Image (tube, helix red, strand yellow):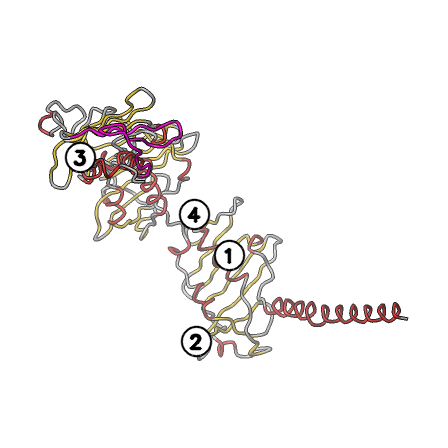
């Protein structure tokens, strides 16, 4: 009997569970999804849209999707489209939901501003069908806009922000990039400014300056330069088909940025011409229009060879250094790394050194950045206090000196330094003097 009673109870509980699942959980969820689907104005996905037409009282804009998924403007001009802007419109339409039906069949469309709508939207889908939506006046509160989907007679409301998102100009929907290129694919950069020309080439993962001098280039600085150029937008298009570039100062530009991109090294060139108010005329040689760019962009693109060259003073691997010598007029400090990787002070006394302190000194030396590079082949070391340096730092790897840093005279918050690796004299912040002027007690590990 007990077994039968238990079985009956289990069956009842199972039935109750199924009832709750179907009627209390699943069914309401399905009803909610169905309600949302019924509210949706369109039943397409944005991937299905092949053409978007926006007709306003005084203008018409037609955008067509290309096979690669990008957009182009077809009317009133044929130019590349702003993919993000047009995709944004299509996404807003895809997600549009009717708020409520205000008229099952409007006999007077002008009552809702739908006789002469603020905008007519035509979406040509890839299955050869067309969805059409009319947006009229806003509701008295301004929160909603009256709408009608052709060929249905109902008038319904949509959030007014949809109308706002569709109030676009040709400028809004066209490609506004001053220069379109794949940043990761740039292999060579040339910046020409009047009489100065800087050429940098990518070598492996690094950049090398070729002109006006041969030197390692600053990878991070070039990356910032390319990012700024890639993200720059034209402020205004002033001449779609210029007959001459002379009146814009583009026949002899004040600046030319040329990129070679990809394995085929496709050439991309941006030219900057005369100033016009707070802007400058510019031209991308792969396109016809002359446009305006901001003075702020021009200033950010104006670089000197020093700006783009690597300003690292000393190059070495901290972990590979196993001996450090700090030589000053009053004392010499020598630290040696033992077989366990710990640092030991060997001169002027033999004691355990603070590993963090010695590593910190090495990182301070490695982190030195030049504020100025005075000359590539200096002759008068005494002028900079480098004939009798106030500090000499020598870094060893195994039995060889891998780097030697000479610290000379101070001047206006800076100090002259020279290294074994380079013939140049560098000007760096004078903080390095304090960082290398350590006493024995600063380095010794106190037990």
Q: Earlier in the sequence, mark 3 or mark 1?
A: 1
Does the residue at mark 1 contact the one at mark 4 (Cβ under 8 Å)?
no
Magenta includes 351?
yes
Give coordinates of residue 388: x percent, y percent.
Answer: 12, 26
Mark 1–mark 2 Cα distance, whole angstroms, equals 26 Å
Count of numbered badges drawn on the protein = 4
| Vertical arrangement, residue 289 with respect to residue 140, above or below | above
Q: Earlier in the sequence, mark 1 or mark 4?
A: 1
> In front here: 326 or 168?
326
Mark 1–mark 4 Cα distance, whole angstroms, equals 14 Å
Which residue position is annotated with label 1? 52
Which residue position is annotated with label 2? 142
Mark 3–mark 2 Cα distance, whole angstroms, equals 63 Å
Does the residue at mark 2 contact the one at mark 4 (Cβ under 8 Å)?
no
Give coordinates of residue 309: x percent, y percent.
Answer: 26, 33
Category of crowding for the residue at label 4, using alpha-carbon neighbours closer than 10 angstroms: few (below 14), some (14–19), many (at least 20): many
Which residue position is annotated with label 4? 80
> In front here: 430 or 396?
396
């Amino acid at each position: 009997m007990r077994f039968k009673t238990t079985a009956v109870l289990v069956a009842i509980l199972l039935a109750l569970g199924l009832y709750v699942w179907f009627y209390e959980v699943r069914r309401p969820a399905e009803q909610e999804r169905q309600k949302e689907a019924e509210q949706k104005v369109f039943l397409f996905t944005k991937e299905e849209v092949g053409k978007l037409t926006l007709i306003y009282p005084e203008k018409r804009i037609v955008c067509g999707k290309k096979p690669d998924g990008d957009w182009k403007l077809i009317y009133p001009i044929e130019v590349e489209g702003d993919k993000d802007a047009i995709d944004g419109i299509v996404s807003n339409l895809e997600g549009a939901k009717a708020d409520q039906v205000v008229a099952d069949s409007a006999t007077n469309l002008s009552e809702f501003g739908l006789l002469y709508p603020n905008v007519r939207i035509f979406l040509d889908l890839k299955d050869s069908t067309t969805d059409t939506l009319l947006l009229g006046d806003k509701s008295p509160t301004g929160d909603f806009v009256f709408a009608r989907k052709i060929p249905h007679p109902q008038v319904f409301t949509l959030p007014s922000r949809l109308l706002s998102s569709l109030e676009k100009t040709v400028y809004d929907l066209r490609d506004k990039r001053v220069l379109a290129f794949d940043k990761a694919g740039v292999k060579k950069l040339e910046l020409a400014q009047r009489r100065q020309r800087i050429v940098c080439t990518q070598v492996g993962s690094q950049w090398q300056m070729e002109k006006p001098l041969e030197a390692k280039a600053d990878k991070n600085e070039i990356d910032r330069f390319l990012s700024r150029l890639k993200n720059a937008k034209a402020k205004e298009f002033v001449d779609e088909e210029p007959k001459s570039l002379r009146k814009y100062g583009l026949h002899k530009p004040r600046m030319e940025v040329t990129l070679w991109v990809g394995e085929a090294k496709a050439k991309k060139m941006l030219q900057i011409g005369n100033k016009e108010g707070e802007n400058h005329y510019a031209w991308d040689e792969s396109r016809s229009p002359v446009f305006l760019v901001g003075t702020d962009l021009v200033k950010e693109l104006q670089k000197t060879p020093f700006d783009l060259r690597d300003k690292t003073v000393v190059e070495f691997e901290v972990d590979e250094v196993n001996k450090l010598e700090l030589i000053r007029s009053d004392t010499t400090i020598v630290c040696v790394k033992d077989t366990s990787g710990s640092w030991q002070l060997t001169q002027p006394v033999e004691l355990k050194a603070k590993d963090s302190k010695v590593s910190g000194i090495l990182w301070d030396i490695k982190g030195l950045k030049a504020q100025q590079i005075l000359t590539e082949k200096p002759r008068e070391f005494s002028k900079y206090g480098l004939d009798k340096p106030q500090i000499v730092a020598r870094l060893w790897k195994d039995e060889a000196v891998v780097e030697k840093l000479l610290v000379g005279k101070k001047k206006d918050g800076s100090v002259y330094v020279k290294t074994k690796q380079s013939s140049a004299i560098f000007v760096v912040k004078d903080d390095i003097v304090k960082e290398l002027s350590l006493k024995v007690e600063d380095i010794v590990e106190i037990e």
